[in-house]
Image: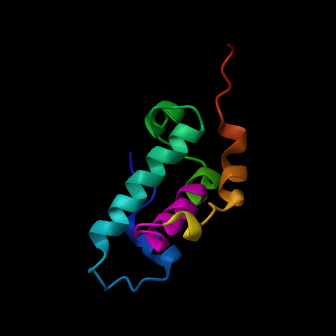
Amino acid sequence: MVVVTIEEAKEQLRVDKCYHGDDQLINRCIDTSVEHVAGLMGYESMEDAFPSGKVPETVRHAVLMFTVHYYENAGVVSAVDLKPVNQGALALIGRYIKYRNT
């Protein structure tokens, strides 16, 4: 399931669509973000979360926000240079979190 395209990610990142030097890195950031958001919502994958294949725009936007975060912080980070994840991305997916009865 394609949640976010590389073209959408480049637009969010403000990377020229004709520049392909970071395509591999951007695709890894997208994949990581999709997996991360699905996990935050309590699912193994986006397919589990949205079997219809229709991913809500708020979830897609959260994936884009995490993609930007991972892209801009792609290097090794020290404890002194930690960058917090935008809390807005977490707020966007709140209504889709699967609550478990334990």
The residue depicted at 53 percent of the width and 63 percent of the height is: 64
Residue 77 relative to residue 85: left or right = left
Does the magenta-highlighted stretch encompass residue 65? yes
Relative height, residue 83 to residue 96 (above, below): below
Give, as a single range, the part of the protein colored magenta: 62-77
The residue depicted at 63 percent of the width and 62 percent of the height is: 84
In the rendered image, residue 78, in percent from the top left (x then y), is placed at 49, 66
Residue 91 relative to residue 13: left or right = right
In the rendered image, residue 70, in percent from the top left (x then y), is placed at 47, 64
Write down the quadrant of residue 57 in the picture.
Answer: bottom right
In the rendered image, residue 77, in percent from the top left (x then y), is placed at 47, 66
Residue 49 relative to residue 27: left or right = right
The residue depicted at 48 percent of the width and 73 percent of the height is: 72
Does the magenta-highlighted stretch encompass residue 36? no
The answer, for residue 3, to whether it is visible in the render is no
Q: Quadrant of the C terminus?
A: top right
Q: Quadrant of the N terminus?
A: top left
Residue in the foreground of this view, choosing between 51 and 19: 19
Q: Count the marks.
A: 0
The answer, for residue 40, to whether it is visible in the render is yes
Residue 34 relative to residue 99: left or right = left
Relative height, residue 3 to residue 83 (above, below): above
Magenta: main secondary structure equals: helix
In the rendered image, residue 91, in percent from the top left (x then y), is placed at 73, 51
Residue in the foreground of this view, choosing between 17 and 28: 28
Residue in the foreground of this view, choosing between 56 and 43: 43
The residue depicted at 49 percent of the width and 35 percent of the height is: 52
